[in-house]
Amino acid sequence: MKTLYRIGKTLAGLFGAYMVLVMPAMAAEGAATDGSDKSWLKMLAAGITIAAAAIGGAAAQGRASSSALEAIGRNPSAQNKIFVPMIVALALIESLVIYALVVVFAKM
């Protein structure tokens, strides 16, 4: 339980840093008026967004697969009732990561 608390605390800190550093770049429309080039900041924002989506998606898929396979290991006769919903859940998780990718490229 302490490990989950520590992971949650770390993710909250990373999300806070993301909100402070990256979100203004994603919210900016058009070129900067002061003549400075902020395209590197948009690239950084895109990279961090995709990284966060990929890490979150991978963690969720690992957790879902682990739980489903443990359940199948405990009760092998329930494989047919567990396997299909697991595949659907994994597809939905992956679609969220792909959606993040589309949003990032649409903003650039």
Image: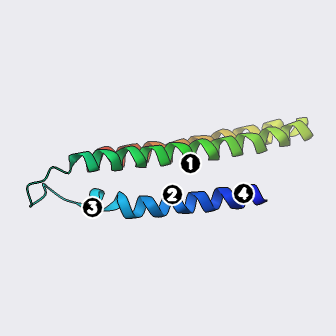
Q: CA distance from mark 3 to mark 1?
A: 22 Å
Name the residue carrying label 3: 27
Identified at 43% across, 44% down, the residue is 50
Above or below, 25 against 51 in this view is: below
Tag in front: 4 or 1: 4
**Residue 4 badge:** 4
Q: CA distance from mark 4 to mark 1?
A: 14 Å
Binning the other alpha carbons within 10 Å of mark 1 as few (below 14), some (14 to 19) or many (20 upward) gives some
Tag in front: 3 or 4: 4
Q: CA distance from mark 3 to mark 4?
A: 32 Å
Type of colouring: rainbow
* Secondary element at tag 2: helix
Name the residue carrying label 1: 56
**Which mark sits nearer the N-terminus, 4 or 1?**
4
Judge by depth and name the residue closer to the eye, 89 or 107: 107
Tag in front: 2 or 3: 2
The amino acid type of the residue labelled 1 equals Gly
The amino acid type of the residue labelled 4 equals Leu
Q: List x then y, in percent, for residue 30.
A: 14, 56
Name the residue carrying label 2: 14
